[in-house]
Image: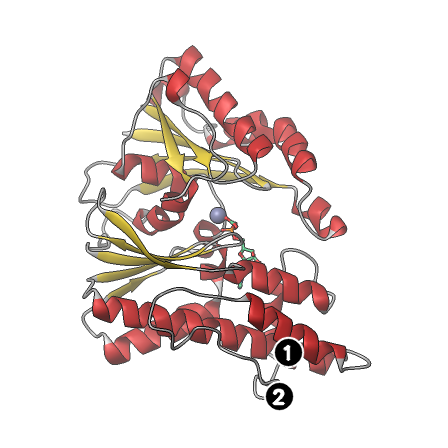
Amino acid sequence: MIILGIETSCDETGAALIKGSAPDKPVTLLSNSLATSLDLHAKTGGIIPEQAAREQLKVILPVIDDAIKDSTKDEIDAIAVTHGPGLIGSLLVGVETAKTLSYIWKKPLIPVNHLYGHIYANFIRDESEELPELPALALVVSGGHTDLVLMKNHSEVTVIGSTRDDAAGEAFDKIGRLIGLSYPAGAKIAKHAKNGNPEIFDLPRPMKHAENFDFSFSGLKTAAVNQVKKIETITDTIRDDLCAAVENAIVDVLVHKTVQAAKKFEVTSVLLGGGVAANEKLQKTLTNKANEVLPKTKIFVPSKNLCTDNAAMIAAAAFYKPNQKSLHEILVNPNLYY
Ligand code: KG4
Ligand code: ZN
């Protein structure tokens, strides 16, 4: 079956087509279209929700058109749309557009939780590739979430840990702002970190050894603020060193807790998802550590453009969790959780 996915939960507007054949096979990507208003938000230092929704209204139909350009609407079997969590105005743009298309085209509509989307990005692969085996542990690390999620099967899902304050992506973005890197700063910090010495700054690893799988990143941000305050001029070298130290601290905690949880729950696979999963240091450190201590566990990481927000992952989640609803039952929920 072919599913059209629509994603507008934050500042991106995405539409994508995926093709699925069987629940024990990967879904394949047919098209993946994305428009972003990031340039606008980089200027203001963050997202202005109303501005994001207005931009999305302008581009949603061209983006959908672009995603289905090589196919026809008759080939589409269902529509999937993010109904939360996210910014209410942005979510409404996607959900109301999807409802209208579902009504006019007479196609079923499947509401999808964006967080499951990040997890199911790992199920988009070439047809010949193996699917992640369950039980799996997912680390969802984005601008709004840092969650460790245990998936026994597609419907038995338990959150075993999450952040008590800032999300990992939020920590990257806030610390980046402090040293003059525009929003979103995660990928920029990663780039500067490549030239830096992580040992120059001594940053804490909050909750690394706590007896649970929760995270906390606001203390790390405060520690970075305090160290930066002492510096008169932030030179390129200082910026690189601080970026390396911040990246190291965040990756260290994420990897340690993920590996501990994977060990405890004896999972077959570990799935990375969310914008921060695009971080190469995180991918490499987790893979190396898992090879060392969990040789039987396979690590899955979506390709970079499927880590950050996209509509293909929303269509993929709908394929494995086909939770079709009638149009009047589908409502946006900015605070939706697992
Ligand atoms: O999943 P996502 O695109 O949107 C949300 O659902 O939040 O994640 C965005 C977050 C931002 O905080 C951004 O700074 C971070 O992902 N990010 C990264 C990298 N690429 C994006 N963080 C660290 N390293 C990266 N390479
Ligand atoms: Zn996201």
Occupied quadrant, residue 266:
bottom left
On the image, the x and y values in percent for residue 300 come to 32, 60
The three-letter code of the residue at mark 1 reads Leu
Left or right of residue 15, residue 261 in this image: left
Occupied quadrant, residue 182:
bottom right
Q: How is the image coloured?
A: secondary structure
Does 29 appear above or below 264?
A: above
Quadrant into which the C terminus falls: top left
Q: Could you tell me which residue is drawn at 64 percent across and 67 percent down?
A: 175
Which tag, 2 or 1, sits closer to the chain's start? Answer: 2
Q: Which residue is identified by label 1?
A: 242
Q: Are marks 2 and 1 in contact (CB under 8 Å)?
A: yes
User: Considering the numbered disc 1 on the image, is that residue within a helix, a strand or a loop?
Assistant: helix
**Looking at the rendered structure, which numbered label has been put on residue 226?**
none
* Residue ranking furthest to the right: 232
On the image, the x and y values in percent for residue 211 come to 33, 72
Is residue 187 something that shows in the picture?
A: no
On the image, the x and y values in percent for residue 221 come to 61, 69
Left or right of residue 237, residue 316 in this image: left
The three-letter code of the residue at mark 2 reads Ile
Total marks shown come to 2
Q: Could you tell me which residue is drawn at 58 percent across and 78 percent down?
A: 244
On the image, the x and y values in percent for residue 252 come to 44, 76
Q: Could you tell me which residue is drawn at 38 percent across and 35 percent down?
A: 112
Q: Which residue is identified by label 2?
A: 200
Disc 2 crowd rating (10 Å Cα; few below 14, some 14-19, many 20+) is few
